[in-house]
Image (cartoon, helix red, strand yellow):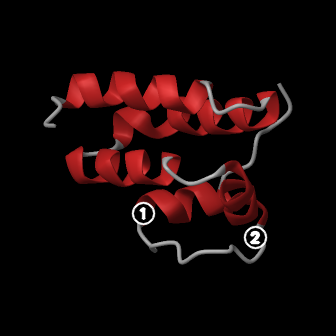
C-alpha cells in the first residue's frame, strides 16, 4: 500500500503513541515528534520500519544494549540510539 508523506507521518505518529506501555509510548512519541518533520521519504520509511520492532529491542537500541535481532544501521536508528529524553 502506498502512502503519501502526510499519510505516512500520521500513521507513524499514531503508532509511536500507542506502543503498549506508557514508558515506550513516551519515548517513541518524543523521538518521533522531534524528528518527523526533518525526515525525507526514505527516512520516514526507515522510521516506520523501526516502529515495527518490539518494545524490548527498541529499549535495547536506545539504551545501548545488545538486541536480539539485527538492526539496520541508518540515520534514523543512529538518531534513536543517541536520543535521550530531557527533563520536562
Q: Nearer the viewer, residue 85 or 8?
A: 8
Horizontal and vertical percent for residue 44?
Answer: 32, 45
- Label disc, if present, on residue 4 of the rendered structure: none
Residue drawn at 21 percent across, 31 percent down:
5
Mark 1, secondary structure of its residue: helix
Specify whether 5 is left or right of 37: left
Specify whether 48 is left or right of 1: right
Mark 2, secondary structure of its residue: loop
Residue drawn at 51 percent across, 62 percent down:
77
Residue drawn at 71 percent across, 38 percent down:
27
Q: If the image is split into quadrants, where does the N terminus sit?
A: top left
Q: Nearer the viewer, residue 33 or 45?
A: 45
Question: Which residue matches tag 2?
Answer: 64
Horizontal and vertical percent for residue 6?
Answer: 24, 23
Question: Which residue matches tag 1?
Answer: 75
Mark 2 neighbour class, 10 Å CA radius: few under 14, some 14 to 19, many 20 or more: few
Q: Nearer the viewer, mark 1 or mark 2?
A: 2
Q: If the image is split into quadrants, where does the C terminus sit?
A: top right
Horizontal and vertical percent for residue 76?
Answer: 45, 57
Among the two numbered marks 1 and 2 on one chain, the one whose residue lies closer to the N terminus: 2
Q: Nearer the viewer, residue 84 or 18?
A: 18
Mark 1 neighbour class, 10 Å CA radius: few under 14, some 14 to 19, many 20 or more: few
As drawn, the residue found furthest toward the right would be 87
Amino acid at each position: 500500500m502506498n502512502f503519501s508523506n502526510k499519510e505516512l507521518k500520521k500513521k507513524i505518529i499514531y503508532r509511536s503513541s500507542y506502543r503498549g506501555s506508557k514508558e515506550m509510548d513516551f519515548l517513541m512519541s518524543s523521538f518521533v515528534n522531534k524528528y518527523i518533520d526533518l525526515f525525507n521519504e526514505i527516512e520516514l520509511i526507515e522510521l516506520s520500519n523501526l516502529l515495527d520492532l518490539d518494545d524490548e529491542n527498541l529499549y535495547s537500541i536506545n539504551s545501548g544494549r545488545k538486541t536480539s535481532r539485527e538492526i539496520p544501521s541508518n540515520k534514523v536508528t543512529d538518531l534513536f540510539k543517541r536520543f535521550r529524553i530531557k527533563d520536562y
